[in-house]
Amino acid sequence: MSKSWITPRWPLVPAILLATWAPVCHALTYQEALDIAESRASELKARQNTVSAAQAARISAGELPDPKLVMGVDNLPVQGSEAWSTTRDFMTMQRVGVMQEVTNGDKREAVRQLADTKVARADAELGIERLSVKRQTRLAWLKVYFLQQQQALLDQIEAENHMLSTAVTARLAAGQGKGSDSLQSRQESIALEDRRDDLERDLSKARADLARWVGAIATEPLTGPPPAYTPNPEHLRHNLDRHPDIAIFGIQEDSGRAEVNLAKAAKKSDWAVELDYEHRAPLFGDMISVQFTFDLPIFAKTRQNPQIAAREQELERVSAERESMVRDHMAQLEALLAEQTALVRQIDRIDQDWLPLGQQKVDLTLAEYRSGQEPLTSVLDARKFLIDTRMKRIDLAARRAAIETELSYLSEEMQP
C-alpha cells in the first residue's frame, strides 16, 4: 500500500502554502484591494475636503480688511426752535464717508505664514490618512489570505483522513488491527471538523474586516501572494525622522512660530484712515474731513507679552511631543525588527528541521503500524504533530507578513 494516503511528502508543503483559490467570478489581488480601499475610503474624502478648505482660506490670508461705509449726522440740534432740523443750524452736517483699517505688515505676513502651514498640515494629514488606510487594508487582506491557506491545507488533510479511514476499515475487514482503530479514526475526523468550524468563523470575521475597506468584493477569494518586503534596519533607523507621523511635527513647529510672530506683531500699531464728505444747509458750504486712528499697545506687559509667552510655550510643547513620538517610533521599530528576525528563524527552522522530522516520524510509525509493531494511535499522534506544524508554519508566515507590513509603514517618508 502506498504511503501517499496518509500524507504527502514534505517537499510538497511549500506548494500547499502558496496555493490560492480558483476565482469564481473575480479574484481580489493585493494591489486591487489597496486601489479599491483608497478610492472608497470616506476618511480620505474628509481629509481632502480639509485640504480644499485650507487652500481656499489661504487666498484671503494677510489681506486688508474690507473698507467701511460711514454715514451719519453731526451737530444735530435737540433743543429750541431748531431742534431736529438738519438745515437751520450752520453746524449741522450730513456726513458720508469711507474708512479703511490698515493692519501692520508684520501681522499680515504672520497671518500668511499661518495659512501656509495650515495648507501644509492638511496635505500632510491627508498623506498620513492615506498610509493608514493602506496599512489597515494590507493587514485585513493578509489575514484573509493566510486563513485561505489554512483552509486549503485543511481540505487536503480531510481528504487524507478519509483515505486513512478507508484503509483502517479494510485492515479490520482483513482481520488485522484492533476494533478501536475505527473509533480513533472517527475521533480524528471529528477533531478536524471542529478545527474547520473555528477556521470558518475566523475567516468570516476577517472578511468582514476586509469588507470595511473594499466592500462586497471581500467575499471573493483572494489570489496572488503578497509582495515581499525585506526591511533595511539601518535605513529605517536613519530615516525615521522623515516618517509622516514625525515629519508633521515640523509643520506644526512652523505653525507655532507663525503664531509667535503673530503675537509679537500685536505690539506694533495698526491704523485706520477715514475720509468723509459733510453736507450742510444750502446757505452754508459743504466740507470734507480726514481722520487717522492708531492703536496704542502701551500695556504690553499685561496684554501682548503674556500672549507671546503662551505661544512660545505651545511651540515648546510641539517640540517635546515630537521628541516623544520619535522615541515611541524607535521603540516600535526595534520591537518589530526583533520579532521579524525571530519569525524568519522560526520559519526556516520549521522548513529545514521540524517538517522533515515530522514527515519522517509519520513514515516510520506508518510502516510499523502496517507491520503490526505500532498501534494506530502512534500514527495519529505523528500525523497530528505534522498537521499542527504545517498550520503553525502558516501562522508564523501570517505574523511575519503583518510585521513586515508594519515595518513597511514605518519606512514611509514625507513627500516634499
Image (spheres, rainbow, N blue to C red):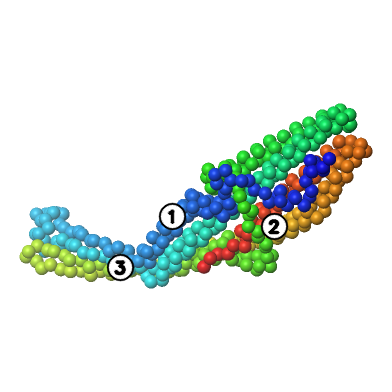
For disc 3, the marked residue is 272
The image quarter in which residue 377 lies:
top right
Circle 2 SS class = helix
Sequence order check, earlier mark of 1 and 2: 1
Q: Nearer the viewer, mark 3 or mark 1?
A: 1
Seen in the image, is 226 located left or right of residue 351?
left
For disc 2, the marked residue is 336
Q: Amino acid at mark 3?
A: Ala
Q: Measured from the top left, where is residue 256 in percent x and y?
A: 50, 64
Q: Amino acid at mark 2?
A: Leu
Residue 49, numbered label:
1
Residue at the image point whose x is 68% and y is 51% from the top: 18
Q: Measured from the top left, where is residue 21 in percent x and y?
A: 63, 46
The image quarter in which residue 207 lies:
top right
Residue 192, numbered label:
none
Label 1: few (<14), some (14–19) or many (≥20) C-alpha neighbours in 10 Å: few
Q: Quadrant of the N terminus?
A: top right
Sequence order check, earlier mark of 3 and 2: 3
